Image (spheres, rainbow, N blue to C red):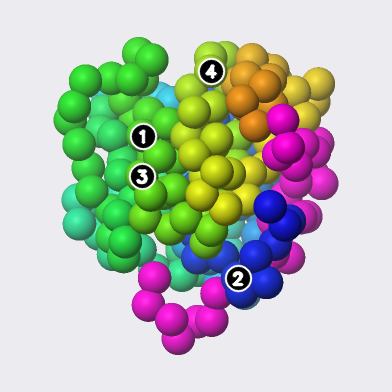
Amino acid sequence: MSETNDVGYDLVVVGTSWGGLAALRALVNGLPKSFGMAVTLVQHRHKDSDELLRTLLQERSELEVCEIEDKMPVEQGRVYLAPPDYHTLVERGHFSLSTEAPVRFSRPSIDVAFLSAADSYAHRAVGVVLTGANSDGSNGLRRIFDRGGLALIQDPVTAESPTMPASAVRSVPRARVMPLPELIRYLAVLPTAPQERHI
């Protein structure tokens, strides 16, 4: 697999858990207003979480941050936040929400989002695993990589909680592994699919 697909990516899906707030705020702060891909953020959080996470991310982002609703269209240049107590599935052109059983004790599950993104967007998907205290995301990141997409992992040594990125490294040993600041800079300049293309 090449590091870029020479055509451009449509979608970035980011998974994180313990320590994720600081990592996500840094990530959205590092994406320029001109960033053209749709960005989906899956953060493990309590089922009764309110709008605070979206607000805290919007404070740092030049892109619009919105919480996903069922059947919401996937649009380039927006940041989408998986809602609490639902699995987020990325389908071609829109999101779906599911109340199926938690996966690895989590709903939303990072694996569910990654697997659906891989199946829907294949080589036009980018999967990113950040800090976290379990192994959620490893299987889904492998699927993204196997479908020709790009796999990025925060260097476990630099993560607030190294368990999740370390598990992802074991699952996808050929992924690009970088400290968070370097990962964000790399992501910010990846080629984007043409704006006129429906995603």
The mark found on residue 116 in the picture is: 3
Part of the protein shown in magenta: 173-199
Residue shown at the point (73%, 37%) measured from the top left = 174
> Mark 4 sits on what residue?
135
Q: Give percent across and percent down for residue 133.
A: 57, 14
The image quadrant of residue 153 is top right
Q: Is residue 74 left or right of residue 28?
A: left
Q: Give percent across and percent down for residue 29.
A: 66, 53
- Ranked by sequence position, the earlier of labels 2 and 4 is 2
How far is disc 2 from disc 4 in space, using C-alphas? Answer: 29 Å
Q: Secondary structure at mark 2?
A: loop
How far is disc 3 from disc 4 in space, using C-alphas? Answer: 18 Å
Task: In the rendered view, tell whether residue 77 sits above or below residue 150.
Answer: below
The mark found on residue 179 in the picture is: none
Residue shown at the point (46%, 70%) measured from the top left = 76
Q: Secondary structure at mark 3?
A: helix
**Which sits in the foreground, 55 or 125?**
125
- Ranked by sequence position, the earlier of labels 1 and 2 is 2
Q: Amino acid at mark 2?
A: Gly
- Ranked by sequence position, the earlier of labels 3 and 4 is 3
Is the C-beta separation of discs 3 and 1 under 8 Å?
A: yes
Task: In the rendered view, tell whether residue 146 sits above or below residue 3.
Answer: above
Q: Amino acid at mark 4?
A: Ser
Q: Amino acid at mark 1?
A: Val
Crowd class of label 4 (few under 14; some 14 to 19; many from 20; radius 10 Å) = some
Task: In the rendered view, tell whether residue 196 sits above or below residue 138.
Answer: below
> Mark 2 sits on what residue?
8
Crowd class of label 1 (few under 14; some 14 to 19; many from 20; radius 10 Å) = many
How far is disc 1 from disc 4 in space, using C-alphas? Answer: 13 Å
